[in-house]
């Protein structure tokens, strides 16, 4: 190699790859020698060998104490050089025309919607920035469901790019003009289109909801892992099914977006591709005005072990980069911060010449033959189909055991010109005026006349046009339209309660918890011949808390790699067994990750045509409260399965204190329409509820999620009384009556979960000490009772002349006299839901207030849900009814040694 050439390389290397980190070269000749050796190896042996040698050098230097920080950031240029780009397989011109029409209709649907009814909202700028990213994927990569209906890729679309997806579906003939017209008007005649991806609202179309920022990416990771799980366990061959997540650069600030990326690398998920639309803007302004989001994300993902493909510059920059032999242009690219790049997009070419190239005379020289107009048109990589194609191609062929992230630089509001391109207001731009429409139309060559354009009409080429034929042919050859979701799917036959009578019995005098009862049942279900294999136990590092460690050995913990070590407890029966076909998803300490697994498993019926049955068992405090948004997404995507809130109940989990004691997850659950929430007291109640859930969700095909609290209080469980199954499922049944000779009154006591025992104790107390008879009811679900009662009431209101319907609750309490006293380990609002339907005086006790560490006995007194509290409340209500005197109540308070001046737990 000539000396001068070596020098150029040396300078190039130092300048461009080290960027600002230029150091003084104390011995240029020596540097040149090393670089020339590298050049030789590269040319004669190729890049693999060069990488090997560099690794060796770095390792040797490190062992000699030379600190060589591992570089996770590469120059601010495309990862794939022009010479390595594969040829583009499609018809570029036709694809551009199709894309332009899709852009137009996407913009038109938002504009029309907002012109017709101001404030309907929608987004134009996000899809404008990502149209190329989607279109290349639609034309060449996304695999449809295929003939069996359950093959194909899973795509998590960036939520507010949905107008683009509808617009494409319109051209594909899947949506009508009326549908587009009714974007965000879902109650309009003929049906509308949901604002964002919502399978609940468009069950034949959307598969996975995304628009709550950060949930798409984390769910995509666990979906990709679940695909591997299905394959490793021999449930389904998912090897050809990829998972794509499209997300925004601003969205990367959400902890959920990046919080699980190491899992993807650790689990070697090369079936997973993230496409991050780096338009450098979020809602209010730049994502990293003073820095560079692409570089920041590159470091993070590379450090986490992902393949990173940067698509920064369009092909018109290639020539400039190639002509710039000094590496100065790459250096300049690296110097400029995102806020400034955003400025360049809104400024004329003369400004770009002066401020970008003008920093160095050499760069000005480089573009001296470029007109200002040409400088202005230099494209960003995310708008160049060939660059995007090259990135996708590399991502799907990488197969190197790593997930891939594509960081595509784009312009927010691309093509909107004055209406918002690159402007801070772009995100909230909802409509274009006549002039802007005209400009948009002309820029993208949409065949709409000047007279018509102001109305922003939709445009669809004829069915036999090249555009429509091409687009349909492409989707046809890729296995059909994306997204799509089947509305009928296979169901399975599940075992019945009769098969599980053994688990619906009593504890034969022994004490145990409902958690223990649940784990026993789950263990048995995992062995069930009909459904055992389909069960997916999910735990976030709490198996031992719930006494589930016995399951480790029995069914194994899923680990793609198997078990590469001898577990420390291998000599024990219940050792920590990891296996490639393990069944348990032991997620570590991540409730968000675990819930994402639940969502993947809970939608396997519609995604894969395989009914998987997730049981996600967790600390109930860290459920709805912590990851409620993912549960909301689960409801939206019609996920099915069981959420088991362990260590539930504000006073039942005692020692753990304020942060752990859950007295409101059942309150939270009220708000989730598909969630059926239960608070069982006994083993048989637990079993009846689980068996009912299995039947309804997997055999009867109902969209539901069962939330069941499981508690750690040990007590004796009775045998199941005759005929209570319906009551357990519907929400209440009379558990035990106590008559008293010459009783002064009869009262109704409601109890749930462990607090049913307080009600039973109160029953004794009231009978023995105060001559009061009572019935104790086990209320397994206030919420289910209320839902049904409310539904009947609504029907009766709207059908006033017809025979009124009666709810189960009303039927049960027909002719029953109060007072009714309710107590649970949850906030009073839970029980108070029933107020309108209770046929008499109704008084609710509950655990409002902050938790604390204490014994159960002390806590139940503090929160006023123990037997004495129930007895005092009963006497108080009887005094209001004139059955006992105020003095009697006063005496009881003293006799029961009740501190009447104790602080109100509400505020304590
Ligand atoms: C959890 C959550 N918080 C806030 C929002 C409101 N929101 C919608 S889009 C958006 C900005 C998105 O920016 P970016 O991710 O960069 O996407 P872009 O539109 O630029 O492609 C925000 C804050 C949301 N949808 N979800
Ligand atoms: Mg953005």
Image (spheres, rainbow, N blue to C red):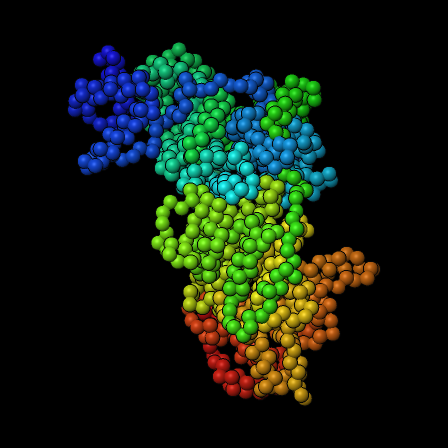
Task: Give the side of residue 870 with respect to residue 545, left or right.
Answer: right
Q: In the figure, is residue 783 to the left or right of 804?
A: left
Q: Is 538 left or right of 838, judged from the image as shown? A: left
Residue at the far bottom in the pictured view: 742
Residue lying at the far right of the rendered structure: 801
Q: Give the x, y percent position of residue 765.
A: 57, 82
Residue 751 visible in the current orientation: no
Residue 35: image x %, image y %?
24, 20
Q: How many marks?
A: 0
Return the residue nearer the eye: 417 or 104. 104
Query: Which quarter of the picture shows residue 119?
Result: top right
Does residue 305 lie above or below 544 as drawn? Answer: above
Image quarter where the C terminus lies is: bottom left
How far across and down, in percent of the image, does residue 514 sit? Answer: 53, 65
Image quadrant assignment for residue 92:
top right
On the image, the x and y values in percent for residue 225 come to 48, 41
> Is residue 278 rendered to the left or right of residue 143?
left
Q: Where 840 falls versus 416 (above or below)?
A: below
Q: Residue at x 25, y 27 (%)?
A: 22
Q: Is residue 256 above or below residue 81?
A: below
Which residue is at 27% across, 21% downward? 38
Residue 312's image quarter? top left
Q: Is residue 900 visible?
A: yes
Tell me the quadrant of the picture where the N terminus can be found. top left
Q: Residue at x 34, y 32 (%)?
A: 73
Check the image and report above or below for 24 versus 530.
above
């Amino acid at each position: 190699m000539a000396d001068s050439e070596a020098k150029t390389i040396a300078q190039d290397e130092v300048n461009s790859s080290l960027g600002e980190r230029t150091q003084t070269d104390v011995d240029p000749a020596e540097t040149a020698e090393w670089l020339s050796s590298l050049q030789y190896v590269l040319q004669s042996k190729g890049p693999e060998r060069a990488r090997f040698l560099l690794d060796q050098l770095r390792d040797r230097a490190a062992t000699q104490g030379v600190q060589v920080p591992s570089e996770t950031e590469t120059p601010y240029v495309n990862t794939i050089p022009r010479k390595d780009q594969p040829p583009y397989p499609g018809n570029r011109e036709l694809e551009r025309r199709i894309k332009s029409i899709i852009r137009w209709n996407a913009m038109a649907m938002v504009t029309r919607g907002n012109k017709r009814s101001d404030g309907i909202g929608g987004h134009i700028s996000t899809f404008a920035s990502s149209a190329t990213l989607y279109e290349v994927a639609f034309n060449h990569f996304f695999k449809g469901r295929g003939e069996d209906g359950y093959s194909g890729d899973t795509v998590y679309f960036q939520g507010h790019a949905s107008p683009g997806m509808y617009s494409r579906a319109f051209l594909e003939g899947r949506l009508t003009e009326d549908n587009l017209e009714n974007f965000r008007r879902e109650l309009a005649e003929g049906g509308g289109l949901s604002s964002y991806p919502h399978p609940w609202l468009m069950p034949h179309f959307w598969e996975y909801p995304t628009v709550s920022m950060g949930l798409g990416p984390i769910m995509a990771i666990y979906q990709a892992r679940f695909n591997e799980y299905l394959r490793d366990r021999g449930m389904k061959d998912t090897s050809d099914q990829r998972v794509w997540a499209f997300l925004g650069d601003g969205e990367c600030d959400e902890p959920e977006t990046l919080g699980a990326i190491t899992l993807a690398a650790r689990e070697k998920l090369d079936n997973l591709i993230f496409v991050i639309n780096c338009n450098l803007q979020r809602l209010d302004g730049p994502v990293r005005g003073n820095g560079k989001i692409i570089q920041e994300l590159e470091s993070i993902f590379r450090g986490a072990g992902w393949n990173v493909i940067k698509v920064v510059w369009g092909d018109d920059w290639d020539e400039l980069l190639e002509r710039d032999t000094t590496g100065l242009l790459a250096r300049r690219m690296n110097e400029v911060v995102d806020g400034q790049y955003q400025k360049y997009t809104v400024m004329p070419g003369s400004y770009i010449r002066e401020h970008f190239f003008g920093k160095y005379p050499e760069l000005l020289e480089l573009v001296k033959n470029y007109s200002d107009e040409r400088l202005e048109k230099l494209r960003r990589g995310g708008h160049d189909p060939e660059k995007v194609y090259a990135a996708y191609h590399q991502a799907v062929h990488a197969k190197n055991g790593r997930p891939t992230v594509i960081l595509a630089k784009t312009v927010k509001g691309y093509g909107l010109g004055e209406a918002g391109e690159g402007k801070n207001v772009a995100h909230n731009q909802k409509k274009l005026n006549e002039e802007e429409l005209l400009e948009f139309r002309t820029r993208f060559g949409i065949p709409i006349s000047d007279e018509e354009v102001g109305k922003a009409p939709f445009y669809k080429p004829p069915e036999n046009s090249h555009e429509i034929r091409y687009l349909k042919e492409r989707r046809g050859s890729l296995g059909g339209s994306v997204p799509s979701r089947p509305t009928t799917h296979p169901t399975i036959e599940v075992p019945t309660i009769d098969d599980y009578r053994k688990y619906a019995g009593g504890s034969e005098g022994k004490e145990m918890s409902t958690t223990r009862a649940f784990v026993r049942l789950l263990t048995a279900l995992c062995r069930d011949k009909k459904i055992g294999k389909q069960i997916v136990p999910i735990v976030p590092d709490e198996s031992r808390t719930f006494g589930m460690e016995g399951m480790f050995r029995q069914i194994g913990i899923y680990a793609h790699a198997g078990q590469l070590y001898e577990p420390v407890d291998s000599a024990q029966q219940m050792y920590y067994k990891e296996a490639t076909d393990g069944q348990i998803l032991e997620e570590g300490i991540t409730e968000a990750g675990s819930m994402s697994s639940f969502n993947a498993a809970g939608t396997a019926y519609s995604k894969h045509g395989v009914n998987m049955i997730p049981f996600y068992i967790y600390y109930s405090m860290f459920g709805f409260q912590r990851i409620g948004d993912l549960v909301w997404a689960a409801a939206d995507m019609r996920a099915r399965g069981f959420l088991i809130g362990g260590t539930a109940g504000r006073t039942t989990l005692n020692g753990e204190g304020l942060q752990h004691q859950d007295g409101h997850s059942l309150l939270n659950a009220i708000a989730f329409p598909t969630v059926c929430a239960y608070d069982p007291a006994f083993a048989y109640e637990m079993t009846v509820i689980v068996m009912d859930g299995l039947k309804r969700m997997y055999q009867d095909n109902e969209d539901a999620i069962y939330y069941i609290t499981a508690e750690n209080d040990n007590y004796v469980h009775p045998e199941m009384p005759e005929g209570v199954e319906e009551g357990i499922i519907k929400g209440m049944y009379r558990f035990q009556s106590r008559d008293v000779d010459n009783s002064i009154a009869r009262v109704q006591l409601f109890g749930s979960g462990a607090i049913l025992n307080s009600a039973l104790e109160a029953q004794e107390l009231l009978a023995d000490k105060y001559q009061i008879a009572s019935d104790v009811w086990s209320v397994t679900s206030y919420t289910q009772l209320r839902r049904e009662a409310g539904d009947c009431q609504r029907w009766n209101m709207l059908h006033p002349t017809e025979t009124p319907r009666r709810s189960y609750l009303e039927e049960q309490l027909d002719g029953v006299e109060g007072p009714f006293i309710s107590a649970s380990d949850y906030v009073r609002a839970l029980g108070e839901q029933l107020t309108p339907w209770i046929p008499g005086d109704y008084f609710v006790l509950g655990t409002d207030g902050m938790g604390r560490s204490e014994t159960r006995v002390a806590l139940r007194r503090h929160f006023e849900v123990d037997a004495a509290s129930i007895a005092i409340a009963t006497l108080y209500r009887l005094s209001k009814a004139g059955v006992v005197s105020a003095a009697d109540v006063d005496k009881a308070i003293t006799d029961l040694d009740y501190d009447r001046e104790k602080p109100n737990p509400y505020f304590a």
